[in-house]
Image (cartoon, grey):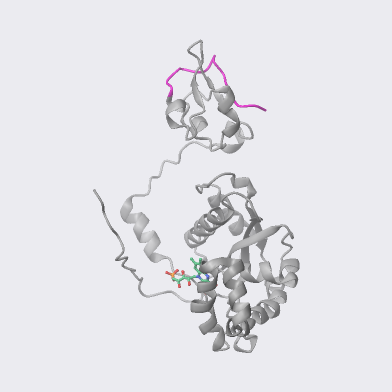
């Protein structure tokens, strides 16, 4: 189905022209609102035009008013409630053994559907591992991978290769953040699971290696997930260690069924929190500059 505007329904308010981020809607030679022919192919499919149209006159490829749009919810969260919600969230790493119902995971995934995205959202895959046994199968491989970090950073040649192949961001994260932790033996399973922290459920965000904006999109989706989990009384934490292991260790990739062509970007552990925090933390950012 192509993008189209039903002229019988169109009220010519031109709001679709105003809101389209790619400027692909305009007036044609008959002064009718229409998709501009040679620009139509750059449509992002963001649905802004369909969301603003009062008479539901617009059809976008892959989107329909029936399946992709709902009326606006009545509740509008005010700033104070929103900040309270954020302030109440903590990264949770201590869980009850109580399993997470599939239904709660589905609700988290539904909340992610409202996230902003760059380029094409359908390129992000979410793998749900709501099975502690499966997570545990992967732990020995992930633990060994994290333990090896010490050996790799201590070796000038491998260290150089990480820098060259993975870039400075990954190199600095491994050297300055993970290496000192790994050196303490922290990730060895004899100390317990300090990777997925005994969580009953795990979400993995992944996409084809070269897919547009997939790193940014995955991180936004993971952020929405931890917030959605919090709203459901669940605890969650982003775990960057798991995708790193998936991308490097074939056994981990296989256990989580991540296709060879895909790169894992982020994972989120989920479960019922064992403890309740007494206070929140406010991290002051001193690097804000207002310019005129
Ligand atoms: C990109 C990213 C990667 C993270 N990876 C891990 C991880 O591998 N293991 C972990 O325990 N926490 C991980 N976290 C959670 C942070 O450590 C946590 O957000 C931080 O300690 C602040 O705590 P708070 O979320 O309770 O404010 C990660 C967070 C982000 C944003």
Whole-percent x, y for residue 63 in the image: 61, 34
Task: Say whether residue 51 is visible.
Answer: yes
Whole-percent x, y for residue 173 in the image: 51, 73
- Taking the view exactly as shown, the residue that stands out farthest to the left is 292
Main SS of the magenta part reads loop
Q: What quarter of the picture does the N terminus occupy?
A: top right
Task: Say whether residue 101 is visible.
Answer: no
Rendered residue at 52%/75% (across/down): 93
Q: Quadrant of residue 106?
A: bottom right
Left/right of residue 262 with respect to residue 70 in the rendered view: right
Residue 43 or 197: which is nearer the viewer?
43
Left/right of residue 259 with respect to residue 228 in the rendered view: right
Asked if residue 7 lies in the magenta stretch, the reply is yes
Query: 155 above or below 47?
Result: below
Exactly how many numbered labels are in the figure? Answer: 0
Rendered residue at 59%/46% (across/down): 121
Q: Quadrant of residue 277?
A: bottom left
Residue 114 or 216: which is nearer the viewer?
216
Left/right of residue 249 with respect to residue 191 in the rendered view: right
Asked if residue 205 lies in the magenta stretch, the reply is no
Range drawn in magenta? 1-14
Whole-percent x, y for residue 70 in the image: 53, 37
Residue 177 or 139: which is nearer the viewer?
177
């Amino acid at each position: 189905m192509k993008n189209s505007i039903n002229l019988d329904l169109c009220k010519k308010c031109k709001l679709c022209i105003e809101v389209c981020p790619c400027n692909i809607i305009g007036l044609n030679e008959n002064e009718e609102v229409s998709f501009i022919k040679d620009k139509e192919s750059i449509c992002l499919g963001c649905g802004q035009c369909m969301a603003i149209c009062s008479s539901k006159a617009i059809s976008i490829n892959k989107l329909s008013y029936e399946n992709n749009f709902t009326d606006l919810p009545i509740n509008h969260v005010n700033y104070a409630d929103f900040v309270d919600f954020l302030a109440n969230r903590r990264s949770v790493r201590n869980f009850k053994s109580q399993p997470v119902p599939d239904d709660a995971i589905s609700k988290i995934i539904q909340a992610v559907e409202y996230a902003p995205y760059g380029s094409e959202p359908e390129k992000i895959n979410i793998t749900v591992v709501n099975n502690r046994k499966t997570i545990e199968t992967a732990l020995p491989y992930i633990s060994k991978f994290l333990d090896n970090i010490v050996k790799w950073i201590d070796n000038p040649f491998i260290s150089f290769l990480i820098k060259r192949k993975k870039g400075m961001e990954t190199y600095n994260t491994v050297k300055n953040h993970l290496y000192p932790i790994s050196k303490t033996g922290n990730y060895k399973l004899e100390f317990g699971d300090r990777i997925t922290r005994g969580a009953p459920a795990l979400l993995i965000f992944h996409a084809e290696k070269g897919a547009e904006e997939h790193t940014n999109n995955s991180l936004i989706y993971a952020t929405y997930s931890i917030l959605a989990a919090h709203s459901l009384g669940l605890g969650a934490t982003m775990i960057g260690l798991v995708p790193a292991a998936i991308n490097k260790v074939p056994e981990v990739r296989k256990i989580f069924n991540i296709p060879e062509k895909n790169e894992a970007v982020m994972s989120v552990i989920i479960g019922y929190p064992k403890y309740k925090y007494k206070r929140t933390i406010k991290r002051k950012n001193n690097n804000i500059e207002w310019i005129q």
